Amino acid sequence: MSVTTLHRPTHRDALGLLESAFGDGRMVTVFGRCSVEYDGRAASSLGPGDRLVVCKPDGTVLVHTDENRQPVNWQPPGCVHRASVRDGRLRIRSERSSPDERLDVDFERIEQATAYEVRDRSDLRLTGSEEDLRQRILDDPDLVEPGFVPTATERETAAGPVDVFGEDDAGRPVVVELKRRRVGPSAASQLRRYVEAVDEEFPEEGVRGLLVAPSVTDRAAALLDELDLEFVPVDPPESAAPE
Amino acid sequence: MSVTTLHRPTHRDALGLLESAFGDGRMVTVFGRCSVEYDGRAASSLGPGDRLVVCKPDGTVLVHTDENRQPVNWQPPGCVHRASVRDGRLRIRSERSSPDERLDVDFERIEQATAYEVRDRSDLRLTGSEEDLRQRILDDPDLVEPGFVPTATERETAAGPVDVFGEDDAGRPVVVELKRRRVGPSAASQLRRYVEAVDEEFPEEGVRGLLVAPSVTDRAAALLDELDLEFVPVDPPESAAPE
DNA sequence: CATTTGATGTCGGAT
DNA sequence: ATCCGACGTCAAATG
């Protein structure tokens, strides 16, 4: 049986469904009027309202209102769900340690409770990521500049790994930082850290820093200019083709 | 009626429910075997599997598998949902412009389709954010250091707004960057940008930069040291009380 | 609109 | 376990 639904169940009947579903690894949704308390990395309190609560077998909890992509409250994977009935009302508690965090969802009315058997073997295939941009540049280094020769990716430095490392046509070391979208000041700072670290390794060699991205903000452009870093425009990885 | 559910509906019946719900601002979930195609800022393809699809009246779409806090695919608020039946199968399409993005969810089997009336007037009250940390420091500046006098928050500089700006007991300008949790190299770089900008405004005054956070990573500590920036430990805003 | 930054960010990969 | 950076990040505040 793939889906089991209770419509306007008693809190005790809902409890039975949840305990059964938590026990055998099914996903659960409960819709109804509830309040939510969270305490952990931060703390929050949410008064009564109608929400959709999703409990996943991996320990995730999501509390969704009718707005926004983000849940209003949640618990990440790795938590332990427990359901109980106190004073005739359903409570879903989800906890974890390190960090210590607790989420309580208290229902005053339950419109629907559902358990789902989920079979899903497919993996998402995504294109247009920074990884794809890197591959494009390795395939055609002239996209960066004529004569550029990549020698390493994710090359370790004292400041962390550099996206693409190589040499320009004059043999100078080149640090390339890739961004899949328009960048702000933080990307310029990141590139700066890498260049400074590589400069320590190759003193007197005039290490160059290149920010490869579709575009930069004004402030980032000013920062790059001040730091003698260079911006190389590239087409965005996937242009959302209007039609 | 607050919740309307169809169990193993025909695709055409599910279509009716969705069109009705999209029309009068109800939230919808559909659970079943589906495939998902996305094209926009990036592009993705997801083969068949059982997922919970949530459509919100604000234009949000979420496609959730039985794992992870994040939906495997989604559409942000502001999109327009449309449902249709092609070759006897339900498709939910959600689109927006600027940027041009499209999400298609194609069902081959529908286990359940539900529409919800959502009433929710409560707002989340959250404590433990960076904002709270700032308030704590304004209330008791000695948490930063004895004699520190804050003079402004969100003070504008050429590099952007500084969290807290003030003077130390010797009258030197102080730039404070706040973080609610353990910080890495990027926070040190951020503070550096602000200090350099303020230094341009107050040359020769020896502007100090203080990173106020619960802790720092080794690399960040080394970076701060190298840049003559200071780390000030503070208790995290909400200590997850173990018990 | 675009920019900037925080977030209970989440997530994956590497150490 | 921690560290680090990407993310179709999202979301809010601000110009």
Image (tube, coloured by chain):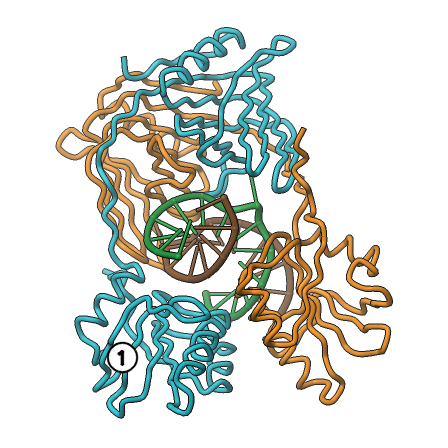
Chain colours: A orange, B cyan, C brown, D green
**Residue B68 visible (yes or no):** yes
Q: Which chain contains the residue that carries disc 1? A: B
The vertical placement of B140 against B62, above or below, is below
- The residue furthest left is A87
The picture places residue B118, in percent across and down from the top left corner, at 29, 25
Q: Is residue B160 left or right of residue A192?
A: left
The picture places residue B90, in percent across and down from the top left corner, at 56, 15
Residue located 38% across and 67% down the image? B161
Kind of residue sitting beneath label 1: Val
The picture places residue B174, in percent across and down from the top left corner, at 33, 81
Q: Is residue A131 left or right of residue A166?
A: left
Q: State the quadrant of the N terminus of chain B.
A: top left
Q: Nearer the viewer, residue A177 or A185?
A: A185
**Label 1 sits on residue:** B144
Q: Is residue A208 left or right of residue A113?
A: right
**Residue A98 visible (yes or no):** no
Residue located 77% across and 68% down the image? A152
Q: Is residue A108 left or right of residue A32?
A: left
